[in-house]
Image (cartoon, grey):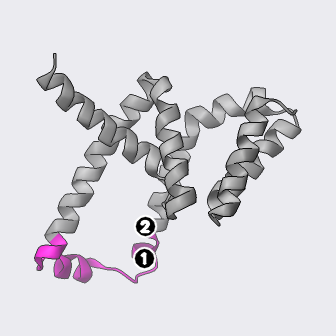
Amino acid sequence: MLNLSTLFLLLLFILGYIGKNQSIMIAIYILLGIKLFKLDDKLFPYIQEKGMLWGVTIITIAVLVPIASGEIGFRDLLDSVKSYYGWIALGAGVFVALVARGGLDLLANDPHLTTALVMGTILAVVFFQGVAVGPLIGAGIAYMVMRIVDFFIP
């Protein structure tokens, strides 16, 4: 069980502990548990393939709870677009969703870049109290910048 990947996870756990980031520590507990029970060969490929979808689904559910509970309704939607802040938020939502679409392509087609994106996310989560949606948004931003660079530098 004690190999380089386990040591790497333990190092990340320590960084998560130092940064007081429960999300990274829970994720590492789960991954180490899967390795401990020798389920990694079966579960890791499945989690790697479906995990992003699960995460996006859980975040979407959390965002929609105020609508489902009745806390936010049509009136609030109409009121929000009466201010320029509402329009800025609407535009930002559209922009981020489009950027994230490119991120999914990048993560699926260039797995070697995933390492840098994940490390950047972990560093932001551990040291700056960031939120671990970074790999997808980071991949989307990277994808967008790469397309711009490709446009100017063929």
Q: In the figure, 153 relative to 146: above or below?
A: above
Which picture quadrant has residue 93?
bottom left
Q: Amino acid at mark 2?
A: Val
Question: Which one is in front, 60 or 139?
Answer: 139
Q: Amino acid at mark 1?
A: Pro
The secondary element bearing badge 1 is classed as helix
Q: Position of residue 30 (x, y in %)?
A: 75, 49
Which picture quadrant has residue 108?
top left
Residue 136 lies in the magenta stretch: no
Main secondary structure of the magenta stretch: helix
Residue 71 lies in the magenta stretch: yes
Count neighbours of disc 1 (C-alpha within 10 A) and say few if under 14, some if 14 to 19, many if 20 or more. Answer: few
Q: Position of residue 114 (x, y in %)?
A: 49, 32
Q: Quadrant of the C terminus?
A: top left
**What residue appears at the point 39 percent right and 74 percent down from the top-left corner?**
67
The secondary element bearing badge 2 is classed as helix
Mark 2–mark 1 CB contact (< 8 Å): yes
**What residue appears at the point 43 percent right and 67 percent down from the top-left corner?**
63
Q: How many marks?
A: 2
Using the image, tell me which numbered label, if any, was put on residue 63: 2
**What residue appears at the point 48 percent right and 61 percent down from the top-left corner?**
130
Residue position for label 1: 66
Q: CA distance from mark 2 to mark 1?
A: 7 Å
**What residue appears at the point 67 percent right and 48 percent down from the top-left corner?**
12
Q: Quadrant of the N terminus?
A: top right
> In the shown orientation, is residue 111 left or right of residue 104?
right
In magenta, the rendered stretch is 63-86
